[in-house]
Image (tube, helix red, strand yellow):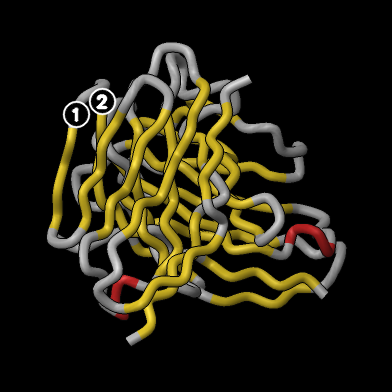
């Protein structure tokens, strides 16, 4: 079974731009969660989608948004990028809210 | 507030030198404690899920245990390929106060040959 895939793997943007990251979950998984990982803060929860609906949201500003499609693929968007948004963005999928989350390889975003 | 604290932050071992990593948590209504391994530049790789105090799980040289307030990841006779950052996470009654999973900062393990 193929694992969680994320595209692109690396991205360089400048301040003020916006970016869209994509995540394809494990086949059959309907829940997709997004996390931001930085050296200082570690892994922090952004939001979770299940059956195209946002089910949970972390403490991030409204510049961070996401969506999920009918095939469970998910995208997250960050608008008006700031230097502090430089991070590894991780996507995880699971069979449901009580199940183990499996992570993708991440998208490394660098904001200049 | 729900919290996960891992110790030590970094651990250096000689090959074959067994040790334990600690994960202390405060969460009301634990709905799962998770251990992941993360190599540099990669996503976390799932290792174990524990649900209730007294539960133990093993995989190769790793053994995870759970009490009401903490979890230990025991590494027996480690090899250099066990070098990685080990992450602990918990899920609370409503996914934790922050949402889904709450992660500790991790323990960076280095095993020297």
Q: Are marks 1 and 2 in contact (CB under 8 Å)?
A: yes
Q: Residue sitting at 54 percent across and 48 percent down?
A: A35
Judge depth for marks 1 and 2 and give the one in front.
Answer: 1
Considering only vertical position in the picture, is A75 above or below A97? below
From mark 1 to mark 2, how far is it between C-alphas? 7 Å
Q: Residue sitting at 75 percent across and 58 percent down?
A: A85
What residue is pinned by disc 2? B51
Q: Quadrant of the N terminus of chain A?
A: bottom left
Q: Position of residue B45 (x, y in %)?
A: 32, 59
Q: Residue sitting at 80 percent across and 64 percent down?
A: A17
Other residues around mark 2 within 10 Å, as few (<14) / some (14–19) / many (≥20): some
For the residue labelled by badge 2, is the local secondary structure a helix, a strand or a loop?
loop
Residue A54 visible in the displayed image: no
Q: Position of residue B30 (x, y in %)?
A: 38, 19
What residue is pinned by disc 1? B55
Chain on which label 1 sits: B
Q: Quadrant of the C terminus of chain A?
A: bottom right
């Amino acid at each position: 079974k193929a694992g969680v895939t994320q595209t692109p793997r690396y991205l360089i943007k400048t301040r003020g731009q916006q970016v869209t990251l994509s995540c394809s979950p494990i086949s059959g998984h309907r829940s997709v969660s997004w996390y931001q990982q930085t050296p200082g803060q570690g892994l922090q929860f952004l939001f979770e989608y299940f059956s195209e609906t946002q089910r949970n949201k972390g403490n991030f500003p409204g510049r961070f948004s996401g969506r999920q499609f009918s095939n469970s693929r998910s995208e997250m968007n960050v608008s008006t990028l700031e230097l502090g948004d430089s991070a590894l963005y991780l996507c995880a999928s699971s069979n449901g809210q009580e199940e183990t989350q499996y992570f993708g390889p991440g998208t490394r975003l660098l904001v200049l | 507030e729900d919290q996960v604290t891992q110790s030590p932050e970094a651990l250096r071992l000689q090959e074959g030198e067994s040790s334990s990593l600690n994960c202390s948590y405060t969460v009301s209504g634990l709905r799962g404690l998770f251990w992941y391994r993360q190599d540099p530049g990669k996503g976390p790789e799932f290792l174990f899920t524990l649900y209730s105090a007294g539960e133990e799980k093993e995989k190769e040289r790793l053994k995870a245990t759970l009490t009401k307030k903490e979890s230990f990841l025991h590494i027996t006779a480690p090899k250099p390929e066990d070098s990685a950052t080990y992450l602990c996470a918990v899920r609370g009654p409503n996914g934790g106060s922050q949402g889904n999973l709450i992660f500790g900062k991790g323990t960076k393990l280095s095993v020297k040959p």
